[in-house]
Image (cartoon, rainbow, N blue to C red):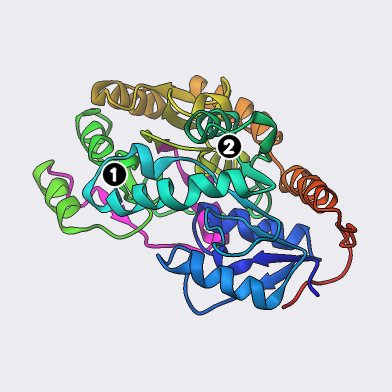
Amino acid sequence: MPEVLYDARWIGNHGIGRFAKELQQHLPDLVGFQARRRPWHPLDPILLGGALLRRNPRLFFSPGYNSPLGWPGAFVFALHDLNHLYVRDNSNAAKRAYYQMIIKPACHRASFVLTVSEYSRQDIRAWAKLSEDRIINVGNGVGPPFTPAGKVFQPGYPYFLYVGSHKVHKNLPRLLKAYAISGVRSDIRLILTGEPDEEMVRQVKELALEGRVTFIGSPSDVDLSSYYRGALALVFPSLYEGFGLPPVEAMACGTPVLTSNICSLPEIMGDSGLAVDPLNTDAIADGIRRLAENSTLNADLRRKGLARAGQFTWQKTAAKTFDALQVALADAKLSPLFRRDAGTGSE
């Protein structure tokens, strides 16, 4: 009988995916659960509950927001933020219903709900009306290859870098406009991860930014770290974050960061980044201009950023997660047999 069954389906090239991958590497005795469907499939709670009835693990642990229905056993899951509740667009209507009907009851059934910042912890507590001791902030981390040493991307021109998805809350329309009106030299370009949709292509054309904006798809971690090292700064004026991994990754590479002064980002960044109002396009533009022209500011942010990034490690996150899983096992009156640093988990 598996001791702790771990939903490894979350591992991927995204925020939760990195969290999931690092936990699997640092807690190798977790037993991986796999299925053909993705964990965010609308029927996954029911199908997952059935799978757990067949597998009968002592504890089920998901690094993401999915939770089982129809299974009476103990489980722990991670709710990184309440983004889908606060970012209002038509595509999120079904997700908001999922949060109300599936996730909120799961918060009360779970042994613990893990999250990644105090901001998210208090947000979840207020929304789910859950006791604070049931919500554990395990944080996020940063590690290799995100270090100052390593390959530096040198395209032949200076550039600002944006890393993340193109979802509404990432605030890319304001970022593009701010870059256009910032007045920085025309040879300073803006590089963004992902691929542009039709609306973004239209905006780039309207702002006369053709030839100054480049999209790089989904680079590997090694390649991404080289983009961080080569950038003048990371520009990340997000409207909502439960943590914000790209700013920490950038700081760990010695790259200055422009980010937002709202949500979790002040908690994560401290005074190590240039914080602006993400709703104020002029403020974003002013920040871009300052980072393009003020070498003293950049040097100060690099120094502070490297020190700040050192506070976030995957070892700390794994240790806090390990402790929560041990308590969950003990509370279920089960023997905590799995160990933090031994063996290799497999299904």
Mark 2 highlights which residue? 251
Residue at the (86%, 62%) spot, across then down: 338
Indicate left or right for 323 with 259 as reference. right
Of circles 2 and 1, the one toward us is 1
In magenta stretch: residue 272: no
Mark 1 highlights which residue? 168
Q: Is residue 306 visible?
A: yes
Res. 64 image quadrant: bottom right
Q: Secondary structure at mark 1?
A: helix
Residue at the (27%, 34%) spot, across then down: 185
Residue kind at label 1, given as amino acid type: Val
Q: Nearer the viewer, residue 28 or 50?
A: 50
State the image coordinates of residue 291 (x, y, percent, origin top left).
41, 27
Magenta region, residue range: 208-235
Q: Is residue 160 visible?
A: no
Residue at the (53%, 64%) spot, across then down: 12
Q: Nearer the viewer, residue 147 or 37?
A: 37
State the image coordinates of residue 292 (x, y, percent, origin top left).
38, 29
In magenta stretch: residue 219: yes
Res. 347 image quadrant: bottom right
Residue at the (55%, 50%) spot, across then down: 106
